[in-house]
Image (cartoon, rainbow, N blue to C red):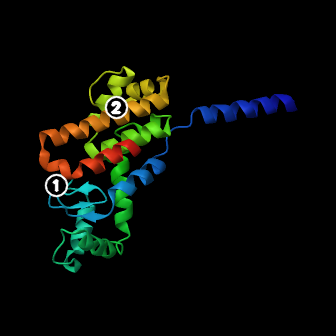
């Protein structure tokens, strides 16, 4: 009986390990390092940004209400890194912002790439960071082409299964990074005004 229970325990542990999927907390922490805090870069098409959430593209995000409530405390000039740091210190006093930011990325990006269905943490990290930086469409179509899934720009369970079944996961990571670099170079080719961001985009793509 002892032998039978030992075998059952080993089998259950093996199954649990086999089914382990990527962890949002890991991907979130890694990408958060690139997103920074408050910024209002004149050359950024997204305009005012908080932890990577651009007001122009996400005007309905609940966090803007909290940020606006503190706006009277902001320095007059908010277009320089030194002023952004001052704003960050002000907003650190608003604890609700932290959870709103985390929830925003979970719902709008991690869930969109089916992160909980992807086994490789590294692949999930790359897809998540790319989606945060550029939207889901580009990473979705790129990974779908590579793994042989239907190219529709929407990562669903079928695409996630193809990603997990891909025989060379490290090669997949390299291919995704290469595709991302090509994409950011194309953005700058079409709009040279974005060239100021190119080096940072490439470094981020290669290290995500």
The image quadrant that residue 9 belongs to is top right
39 displayed left or right of 7 = left
Mark 1 nearby-residue class (10 Å; few <14, some 14–19, many ≥20): few
What label sits on residue 47 in the rendered view? none
Which is nearer the N-term, disc 2 or disc 1?
Answer: 1
60 displayed left or right of 101 = left
Mark 2 nearby-residue class (10 Å; few <14, some 14–19, many ≥20): many
**What SS does tag 2 mark?**
loop
Do we see residue 109 in this rendering? no
Question: Which image quarter is the N terminus in?
Answer: top right
Question: Which image quarter is the C terminus in?
Answer: top left
Instruction: Looking at the picture, tell me which residue is in the foreground, 1 or 129.
Output: 129
Going 36% across and 72% down the picture, which residue do you hit?
Answer: 92
Residue 179, percent from left and from top: 31, 33
Label 2, label 1: how far apart the Cα atoms are: 25 Å
The residue that mark 1 highlights is 56
The residue that mark 2 highlights is 155
Residue 205, percent from left and from top: 34, 43
Going 16% across and 74% down the picture, which residue do you hit?
Answer: 77
75 displayed left or right of 97 = left
Going 20% across and 63% down the picture, which residue do you hit?
Answer: 40
Instruction: Looking at the picture, tell me which residue is in the foreground, 120 or 102.
Output: 120
Going 13% across and 49% down the picture, which residue do you hit?
Answer: 193
Residue 2 vertical placement versus 91 (above, below): above
């Amino acid at each position: 009986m002892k032998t039978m229970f030992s075998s059952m325990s080993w089998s259950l542990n093996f199954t649990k390990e086999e089914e382990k999927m990527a962890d949002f907390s890991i991907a979130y922490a890694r990408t958060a390092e690139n997103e920074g805090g408050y910024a209002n870069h004149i050359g950024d098409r997204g305009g005012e940004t908080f932890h990577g959430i651009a007001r122009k593209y996400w005007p309905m995000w609940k966090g803007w209400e909290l940020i606006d409530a503190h706006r009277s405390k902001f320095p007059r000039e908010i277009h320089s890194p030194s002023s952004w740091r001052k704003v960050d210190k002000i907003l650190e006093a608003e604890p609700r912002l932290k959870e709103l930011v985390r929830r925003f990325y979970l719902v709008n990006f991690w869930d969109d790439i089916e992160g909980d269905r992807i086994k490789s943490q590294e692949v999930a990290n790359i897809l998540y960071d790319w989606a945060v930086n550029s939207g889901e469409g580009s990473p979705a179509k790129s990974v779908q082409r590579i793994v042989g899934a239907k190219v529709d720009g929407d990562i669903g369970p079928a695409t996630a299964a193809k990603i997990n079944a891909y025989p060379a996961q490290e090669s997949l990571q390299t291919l995704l990074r290469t595709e991302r670099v090509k994409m950011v170079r194309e953005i700058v080719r079409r709009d040279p005004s974005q060239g100021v961001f190119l080096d940072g985009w490439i470094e981020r793509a290669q290290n995500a």
